[in-house]
Image: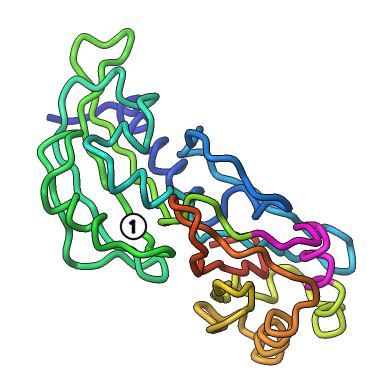
Amino acid sequence: MKMNIRQVGLIAAPLLIAGLAFFYPQEPVKSKAPELKPIENIFAPAVGPLALEEEHPFYYGVDNRFKGVPLHRLQAAVSLEDFLGDGYTFQVASYQSVKLYEATDGILSKEFYPSANNILSQGQKDFFAQASYGTDFNFDIRFLENKNGYEEPIADRVTPYLTVVPAIETYYKPGQDELIRYLRENNKALTMGLKEQDLEAARIRFTISTQGTVEDVKVIRASGLPSVDLNLINLIQNLPGEWEPARNVKGEKVAQPLTLFFGNRGC
């Protein structure tokens, strides 16, 4: 059966929204310990701190790779609504397929864990039971949705990318603004005169240990200028100021991976 232009648009729009969520980090790491509260607006793309000065038009952000979901919530979940919310499901007429993928450095695994509908399968529960902090994953959810003005349900799809985080996340004690200012100012000499398109959207991953120290710094996606990447690694490793370690649901200190996003604001 052929789809008309309106139907194609309805299918494409959620993909565009999900795509934006893939490329941009969500809310920046807070300067104080966040309270435990339900996650809201999980599909909305986020924009972290931007350096939009004319002489230095590059993006800087430090956050989880994708939208964070606490591990204890995932391990206690029975349905998608337990961590995605029910905002997108109230018009679902029927599910066509639900697949869970691990997303390593943004690349989906070939193996996936399916379920028949919004109720998690045993394979999906096992995946969350074995997940660690910093694990990135994706749900590819395809369904028929009731739309006002249409007699028949319309095919739709959402593909949220998410990251497993502790109950209380790590944070930089001097504050997120100070962190971004330090990175921007100490990287300016190498990027002065460059245009936004001269650098790729780079990713540098690092871990804040249970002692609040920076460990395991590595480039996940290069900027295109090795000198810039090496400088950013050095800046992260020698960051002044202290980090407050993350804590699990029991209040115990745990290590948490983070990602430094840098470069242009493209893909």
Q: Which amino acid type is shown beneath numbered disc 1?
A: Phe
For the point 60% across and 65% down, which residue is it? 245
For the point 23% across and 35% down, which residue is it? 79
- Which of 240 and 65 lies nearest the eye of the viewer? 240
Residue carrying label 1: 137
Q: Position of residue 44 (x, y in %)?
A: 52, 39
Q: Which residues are magenta?
A: 171-184
Q: Position of residue 65 (x, y in %)?
A: 50, 61
- Asked if the magenta segment contains residue 182, the reply would be yes
- Which of 164 and 14 lies nearest the eye of the viewer? 164
Q: Position of residue 126 (x, y in %)?
A: 17, 56
Q: Is residue 110 above or below residue 6?
A: below
Quadrant for the N terminus, please.
top left
On the image, which quarter does residue 185 sit in?
bottom right
For the point 33% across and 9% down, which residue is it? 148
Asked whether, in this view, residue 62 is left or right of residue 92, the answer is right
Query: How many numbered dots are placed on residues in this image?
Result: 1
